[in-house]
Amino acid sequence: MPLCGEVLIVDDTPENLQVLSAILRAEGLNVRLAPHGAFALASVRARLPDLVLLDVRMPGLDGFETCRRLRDDPATCAVPVLFLSASDKAEERVAAFTAGGLDFIPKPFNAAEVVARVSTHLTLARLRRELAVANTRLAGCVRDEQAQRQRVERVAAERQLRLDLALDAAGMGIWALAGDGSGIACDAE
């Protein structure tokens, strides 16, 4: 089943951009390319991708700082970022996660692994969006239910007050309360 979505690949090495874009386009994804961090930030702000693949080491704005800036901006903070690196150092992977990355794809790229990780994170991002929509809908239902409960409680309190007033004022006779609570009648003998 082809993947759907748009991925922004950020890498200063043209060969890496070509390899990754070929892998992802073959899976049905739309791909945008950025040669450095500053270009990536402008591209993400212009149109949010569904996912960003971000090289760690780039001249100028490196991947860590690019990711931190994406996370600091309310308009871009929810875009999933997966880091790319030839380094196998644990410190670099930890720094990637600390900067806000969700995953780490090693270089050289294994096509099956790239597709699996991208697919997983696109699915997670879609599910997060769906959950946010469902939570918003549920919050609206809760507000409606609370408003309805307040109306019912207000009507019940008004009816109780009418009944209490009627009982306090009751003398001799037969009293009748209208079925809808709208009135009281007395047949005094």
Image (tube, rainbow, N blue to C red):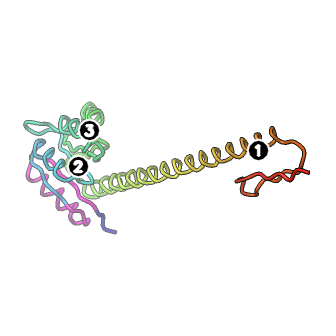
Q: Would residue 94 be found to the left or right of residue 132 on screen?
A: left
- Label 1 – label 2 distance at C-alpha: 66 Å
Which amino acid type is shown beneath numbered disc 1? Leu
Q: Quadrant of residue 65?
A: top left
Q: Would residue 58 be found to the left or right of residue 131 on screen?
A: left
Is residue 8 one of those drawn in magenta? yes
Give, as a single range, the part of the protein colored magenta: 5-30
Residue 106: x, y in percent? 24, 45
| Residue beneath disc 2 | 52
Q: Is residue 58 above or below residue 120?
A: above
The residue shown at (22%, 66%) is 26
Q: What secondary structure is found at the residue carrying circle 2?
A: strand
Residue 97: x, y in percent? 30, 36
Is residue 149 one of those drawn in magenta? no
**Do the CB atoms of the residues marked 1 and 3 lie less than 8 Å apart?**
no
- Label 1 – label 3 distance at C-alpha: 60 Å
136 and 130: which is toward the camera: 136
**Numbered badge on residue 71:** 3
Of the numbered discs 1 and 3, the one sitting upstream in the chain is 3
126 and 11: which is toward the camera: 126
| Residue beneath disc 1 | 163
Which amino acid type is shown beneath numbered disc 2? Val
Disc number lying in front (2 or 3): 3
Q: What secondary structure is found at the residue carrying circle 1?
A: helix
Of the numbered discs 2 and 3, the one sitting upstream in the chain is 2
Task: Give the crowd class for mark 1: few <14, some 14-19, many >=20 residues within 10 Å.
Answer: some
Q: Would residue 107 be found to the left or right of residue 18 on screen?
A: right
Which amino acid type is shown beneath numbered disc 3? Arg
